[in-house]
Image (spheres, rainbow, N blue to C red):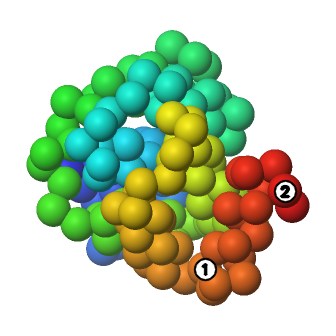
Amino acid sequence: MIERLKKLFAVPESEPVKPDAHQLAVAATALMVQLSRVDNDEDERELKTIVDCAVKSHQVTREEAEEILQDALAHAEDATSLYEFTGQINDHLDQEQKQALLESIWHVALADGRIDKYEEHLIRRMADLLHLNHREYMQARHRAEGTG
C-alpha cells in the first residue's frame, strides 16, 4: 500500500499536481486503519465506522470506501511512518478539514465503546503530525463523544 500511495502522490518536479479527493480519502483511511490496529483488537464496529466516515467526509461511494478500506487493511503492515499519510494531508487540507479528520479518527476509537491508552496516544501523535493544537485535539474528541 505504501508503494501504491507513493505512486499516487508522486509529484514530478516540473508539474505540481494536487491529489484528488479519492487520494486524500486513501490517506485519511490509512490513518484510521492504523488506529484500528494499535490495540491489537481490530473490531468490526471500528471498520464500519471507517467506511461511514469515508463516505461522509470524502464524497466516495460506500463501495469505494469499502475498496479503500480493504486495500488499507491488506497493506497496513507496510506502513513505516504516519508521516507518509499526514504529510500529504497537511499539504492539501486546511485546519478545519484536518480537525474534521481528527474527529473521524476519534469516532473510530470510540466505535468499540472504549478508548485504549494506545489509541489515545496514537491519536495525540496524529494530531501533532497534523499540526493541530491541544484545543483542536480536545474539540475534536468532545464532538466525537457528542459533548461539544
Residue 78 placement (x, y as % from top left): 13, 48
In this rendering, position of residue 119 left or right of residue 95? left
Q: Nearer the viewer, residue 123 or 99?
A: 123
Mark 2 residue crowding within 10 angstroms, few (<14) / some (14–19) / many (20+): few
Question: Residue at point 62% right, 36% down?
Answer: 53
Question: Residue at point 63% right, 85% down?
Answer: 133
**Where is 94 relative to 58, above or below?**
below
Q: Is residue 133 visible?
A: yes
As shown in the figure, which amino acid type bears the numbered disc 2? Thr
Q: Is residue 28 visible?
A: no
Specify the farthest residue to the top: 63
Q: Secondary structure at mark 2?
A: loop
In this rendering, position of residue 90 left or right of residue 52? left
Q: Nearer the viewer, residue 96 or 134?
A: 134
Residue at numbered disc 2: 147
Q: Kindly indicate the quadrant of the structure image that contains residue 26.
A: top left
Residue at numbered disc 1: 132
Residue 61 placement (x, y as % from top left): 60, 19
**Where is 5 relative to 120, above or below?**
above
Residue 13 placement (x, y as % from top left): 30, 74
Q: Secondary structure at mark 1?
A: loop
Mark 1 residue crowding within 10 angstroms, few (<14) / some (14–19) / many (20+): some
